[in-house]
Structures are given as C-alpha cells and as structure tokens.
Image: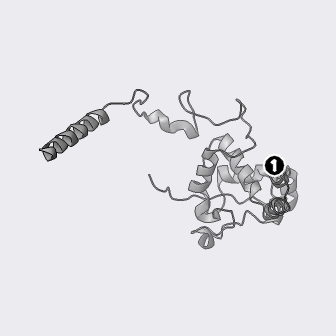
Amino acid sequence: MPARIRIFALGLMLGALGFACNETPADLREWRPSDHDHTSNPNAEQVQVTDAGSSEPGHGLDDVTIVAWQQNCTSCHGALGHGDGPQGPMLHAADLSRSDWQAKTSDEAIAATIRQGRGKMPAFPLPDATIARLVQLIRMLDADRMQQAMAAVAAGQNSAAPVEAAAPPAHSTAGAARSGAAAPAPTSAPKVGR
C-alpha cells in the first residue's frame, strides 16, 4: 500500500507542476518585429545603454559591449585582440594590442572602421554608444599598458591604480592623418549558441 500512496503523491505533484508551468508570466509580452530595430532606430520600449542619460561611454565596460566584442570581433582578432582568432590568420587580422598601432591610430578612425568596415571586415551597424565602448575596449588591449598594470599589481599597489595606469591617452584624428594609418577594427563572427 505505501507504494500506491507514493505513486499517487508523485502523480499529483507532477500534475500540479505541469499545470503551474502552463501559466503565462505577467511581465511577458508578445514579440513584435519592431523589437529588432534597436540597432538603427531604438524605440521607447527598448534599452539604450548610457551612463546617467549621457550618450558618452562610461568608465567601465558593460555586458552589451562584451557581447558585441565576442560576437563580432573575437573570431578574427581573438579574445585579447592579438589577431589570433580562428579566422584571424586566414584574414590577416590586425593585432590590436600592438602599442605602435595603438599610438598612431585615433579613436575616431577605429570607430569609423567599425561603422564602415575595411578590407575583408564588414561594417557593423551598432549604436554609437556601443561603438564608443568597443573603442574603449580596444584601447584597453594595449600590451604595454597591460604589462604596466600587471607590474603595478605585482608591486603591491592598490587595485585602483592599475586601472588608472591602463587608461589610454586621448587620440586625435590629426595623429592618424599624419601617419596615414587607417584603423583596423573587429570583424564579423558567427553567432554562437542560442
């Protein structure tokens, strides 16, 4: 008899769970085609990531920037920008961590390359805030600054000092124009996992 009670209790519990799983959450709405217009035409129901209402990028990187980097850039430039992604050698992807490249390339040139594409790299129609943060991320990849930050951490300085030491200097368009350099930028990557 105890086996029948267990089976009955288990059946009752599974029935209750099955009935509860059919309930629609109160905060879930129907998907609309306009939900995909966020890259070129954000609407009031979509989220645009900015700091305190500003269109300027913040001090840190957000999840949107990291996902944009992973989905669009790492297959060619690699996780740390060395040009060693799976498609990097075949496409001769630029090593974005080289200090000489970082010094002669302006932020504006990097942003323009992301927006318009260059060579085998396609254009990425991303929001301006995301492109500005991708430029910020690319500046953080500078190998010399990374080594200085690591040395500061190893020397026992507080954790805030390496972040300040790793902050890139302001780059101007004039510097890129003098060197005649165009900025290579992230390339398209296949979408991963759903």
Q: Residue at x 73, y 32 (%)?
A: 54
Q: Residue at x 58, y 50 (%)?
A: 67
Residue 122 falls in image quadrant: bottom right
Q: Would residue 5 be found to the left or right of residue 147 on screen? A: left
Please state which of residues 106 and 144 is positioned toward the viewer in this rendering. 144
Secondary structure beneath dot 1 equals helix
Q: Residue at x 74, y 37 (%)?
A: 56
Q: Which residue lies most toward the bottom here? A: 89
Q: Would residue 85 be found to the left or right of residue 133 on screen? A: left
The x, y position of residue 160, in whole percent, is: 81, 49
> How many discs mark residues in the rendered view?
1
The x, y position of residue 6, in whole percent, is: 19, 44
Q: How is the image coloured?
A: one colour
In this rendering, the answer to whether 146 lies above or below 123 is below
Q: Which residue lies most toward the front here? A: 1
Residue where numbered disc 1 is placed: 160
Please state which of residues 147 and 114 is positioned toward the viewer in this rendering. 147
Please state which of residues 193 and 157 is positioned toward the viewer in this rendering. 157
**Tag 1: amino acid:** Ala
Within 10 Å of disc 1 (Cα), the crowding (few <14, some 14-19, many 20+) is few
Q: Would residue 92 be found to the left or right of residue 149 on screen? A: left
The x, y position of residue 140, in whole percent, is: 76, 55
The x, y position of residue 27, in whole percent, is: 44, 28
Q: Would residue 139 be found to the left or right of residue 123 on screen? A: right
Q: Quadrant for the N terminus, please.
A: top left
